[in-house]
Amino acid sequence: MQTVMREAELAAFLEREFPQVKDDFAIERLTGDGIVVRLKVAERHLRPGGTVSGPSIFALADVVVYLAILARLGPVALAVTTNGGIDFLRKPVAGTDLIGEGRLLKIGRVLAVGDVLIRSDGMEDPVARASMTYSIPPNR
Amino acid sequence: MQTVMREAELAAFLEREFPQVKDDFAIERLTGDGIVVRLKVAERHLRPGGTVSGPSIFALADVVVYLAILARLGPVALAVTTNGGIDFLRKPVAGTDLIGEGRLLKIGRVLAVGDVLIRSDGMEDPVARASMTYSIPPNR
Amino acid sequence: MQTVMREAELAAFLEREFPQVKDDFAIERLTGDGIVVRLKVAERHLRPGGTVSGPSIFALADVVVYLAILARLGPVALAVTTNGGIDFLRKPVAGTDLIGEGRLLKIGRVLAVGDVLIRSDGMEDPVARASMTYSIPPNR
Amino acid sequence: MQTVMREAELAAFLEREFPQVKDDFAIERLTGDGIVVRLKVAERHLRPGGTVSGPSIFALADVVVYLAILARLGPVALAVTTNGGIDFLRKPVAGTDLIGEGRLLKIGRVLAVGDVLIRSDGMEDPVARASMTYSIPPNR
């Protein structure tokens, strides 16, 4: 995957443009076809029993695909999610960060699609699987 | 739809069991086949430009189907989301609550399925459409 | 919903452009926000036990949203499905046609989204729920 | 992945139990975490322009996950699809078989989940991505 933004630039972009969530996520690394992002699990992400909430897992999947698109298209891209699908597979390990590993499957003229596997840090079996479609604005 | 919990009981359950999100949602009313829930939009739900974040909209859809199931099965049900699908259709109106109107399509032995239309309060055109599947625990 | 094609025109279009499936479907009627289409269940749609196959139910959902879009945009629209999500809720009644009732939730510049409830003819409880996104070509 | 049925047994099962579709699919091979299946594209799978129909692609994804589950659980399992999600990414190459490569993400007590990448035979870029959930019957 040819990238136009690297990890540090993506982190700076996230911090500048998304102040509401910048403390939630850490960019681990770009990969050959995507990106790996960490959800720094905190009290506000939890549900009774210590499990990470579904919307927090959805948010991780969403940001993974968003950052993978930015890495390819650059910061000018004002992409918006048009569709998301998620399967919750297992209960996350309590008190442990989540790691989302995403890959881009398509970057088209108007749509980009990626999918994501989410695991508790250090575990093999996935906690969730998600796919996200973004609409790419014209005139970028 | 025959219910075993009414609006006030559902609100009390939400407040007691989900302290992290109790301030986010207000139960508007039970309907013939489901429930209407309000997302009380606040700064923490927003993204740049004043739009409500995708994960916040997902969270509303998730809680709508959850509460519709509880209304039917009662508070003993420890249901967990197994699948969610969401289409983001339009940008929400800035500074306006979101209203999620859900209906149960199936309450089976092991799975319950519902879908939800989400609108900016007072608007006709939907902001999002979502469907959620919950796993119903045995021995309830 | 303002339409530019009515039932007879849609049926003629389907017969002319989709000879492979024209015998599978019958257009029942346009509705205020969508369309009702019948799957004329035959041997080729069945699985062991007499149930209608999942892909046949998916095909009905797909054609319902496609025809709802055509009714609005006219026969020039070369729309293609970009995303489909389907929940299979109950076993269809054996030897009975399926009725798909769809509504358009959005007709945008580049995307159209609709959802569909599918029932065995004459039954109340739905067999399946589906949502479909179509990409609308430019320069139409 | 520990399997209880190998390629030849799966093919025999498909031929015996699913006579309606046995000519559509060929089992290529079991993999470490799933299976590879070929859709032998014929006239009946096509749409105008020579492209493979969406429902035929959905059918391939569905059978991929079904066979991956059978390989693990054996022929007694009467699994049924409860949810399917599919992204159509690119137009398939005309006159070319489709290859579906699936992996199981979860085999639980009541649900099994897998996802599938579908490509035109010999091509790198995927034509579609799908995920499927199956309900596993009790007392198996």
Image (cartoon, coloured by chain):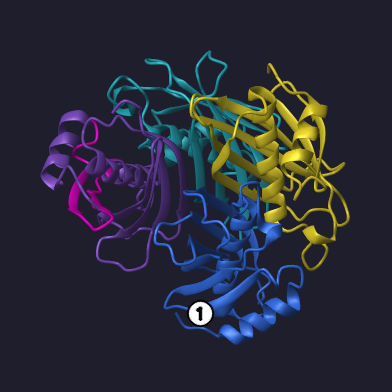
Chain colours: A blue, B yellow, C cyan, D purple
Q: Residues within 10 Å of mark 1 (few under 14, many from 20)?
A: some
Secondary structure category for the residue under label 1? strand
To which quarter of the image does residue D120 belong?
Answer: bottom left
Picture coordinates of residue A20, whole percent (x, y): 76, 68
Residue C128 seen anywhere in this rendered image of the structure: yes
Q: Is residue D81 above or below residue B139?
A: below
Mark 1, residue position: A29
Residue range in magenta is D19-44
* Side (left or right) of D53 relative to B90: left
Q: Nearer the viewer, residue C68 or D18?
A: D18
Picture coordinates of residue B93, whole percent (x, y): 84, 53
What residue sits 25% from the left and 61% below the top? D121
Picture coordinates of residue C14, whole percent (x, y): 47, 36
Residue C140 seen anywhere in this rendered image of the structure: no
* Side (left or right) of B85 relative to C26: right
What residue sits 57% from the left and 40% below the top? B80
Q: Nearer the viewer, residue B106 or A121?
A: A121
What residue sits 68% from the left and 71% below the top? A78
Q: Is residue D120 above or below residue B138?
A: below
Q: Nearer the viewer, residue D41 or B96?
A: B96
* Side (left or right) of B68 relative to A130: right
Q: Nearer the viewer, residue D69 or B16?
A: B16
The three-letter code of the residue at mark 1 reads Arg
